[in-house]
Image (spheres, helix red, strand yellow):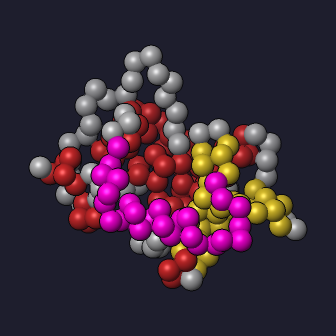
């Protein structure tokens, strides 16, 4: 990490709620198995869902999956293959809304689960902003560790693209 600027991203916020070890690995540019079926499926769903909407709005250290301008203003969306990790996705999208807010852009958020044909509105309120502040500090603490946190078996491990790295 020496000599390199460290920034929190929406992806790191997502993984913080799932596995701190993944936060460290991603933050240190140790990439997961790109041929992992779940990685490929997630990429496919993101690329081919909502074909009429604009893809990938990049602001600061954030890359939002889809966006549109509606009568209410800017709407940014995060596309997930399942609502199983809904809280992680909600906080990731809240992070994006916070990045936009810091730049003077008011936006609404939509979590999208195309396989479930569901959408969920996400708003950035004071309580969520406080939680994000705490989480960002904790992510930075993890990133500055000299080694990744020890692996811990959780339900997510079965479908994780880092499984070989942690458990071989």
Q: Is residue 152 magenta?
A: no
Residue 4 pos. (x, y %): 47, 22
Location of residue 110 with respect to 23 vertically, above or below: below
- In the depicted view, which residue is nearer to us: 11 or 145? 11
Location of residue 34 with respect to 66 vertically, above or below: above
Q: Residue furthest bottom?
A: 117
Location of residue 166 with respect to 154 vertically, above or below: above
The residue segment tinted magenta is: 31-56
85 lies left or right of 150: right
Q: Residue furthest right?
A: 71
69 lies left or right of 130: right
Residue 97 pos. (x, y %): 67, 52
Query: Does the rendering let one see residue 121?
Result: no
Q: Is residue 44 magenta?
A: yes
- Quadrant of residue 113 within the rendered picture: bottom right
Count of numbered marks: 0
Residue 107 pos. (x, y %): 75, 56
- Quadrant of residue 40 within the rendered picture: bottom left
User: What is the quadrant of the N terminus in the image?
Assistant: top left
Q: Residue at x 64, y 54 (%)?
A: 56
Query: Does the rendering let one see residue 43?
Result: yes
- In the depicted view, which residue is nearer to us: 99 or 50? 50
Q: Residue at x 79, y 59 (%)?
A: 74
Q: Residue at x 57, y 83 (%)?
A: 117
Residue 115 pos. (x, y %): 50, 80
Q: Residue furthest top?
A: 3
40 lies left or right of 148: right
- In the depicted view, which residue is nearer to us: 81 or 102? 81
């Amino acid at each position: 990490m020496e000599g390199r600027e460290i920034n929190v991203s929406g992806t790191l916020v997502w993984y913080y709620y799932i596995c701190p070890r993944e936060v460290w690995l991603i933050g240190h540019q140790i990439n997961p198995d790109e041929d992992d079926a779940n990685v490929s499926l997630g990429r496919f769903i993101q690329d081919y869902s909502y074909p009429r909407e604009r893809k990938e709005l990049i602001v600061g250290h954030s890359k939002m999956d889809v966006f549109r301008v509606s009568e209410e203003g800017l709407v940014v969306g995060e596309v997930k293959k399942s609502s199983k990790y809904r809280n992680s996705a909600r906080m990731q999208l809240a992070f994006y809304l916070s990045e936009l807010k810091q730049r003077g852009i008011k936006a609404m958020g939509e979590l999208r689960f195309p396989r479930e044909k569901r959408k969920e509105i996400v708003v950035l309120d004071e309580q969520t902003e406080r939680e994000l502040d705490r989480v960002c500090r904790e992510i930075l603490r993890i990133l500055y560790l000299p080694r990744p946190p020890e692996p811990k078996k959780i339900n997510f491990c079965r479908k994780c693209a880092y499984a070989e790295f942690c458990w071989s």
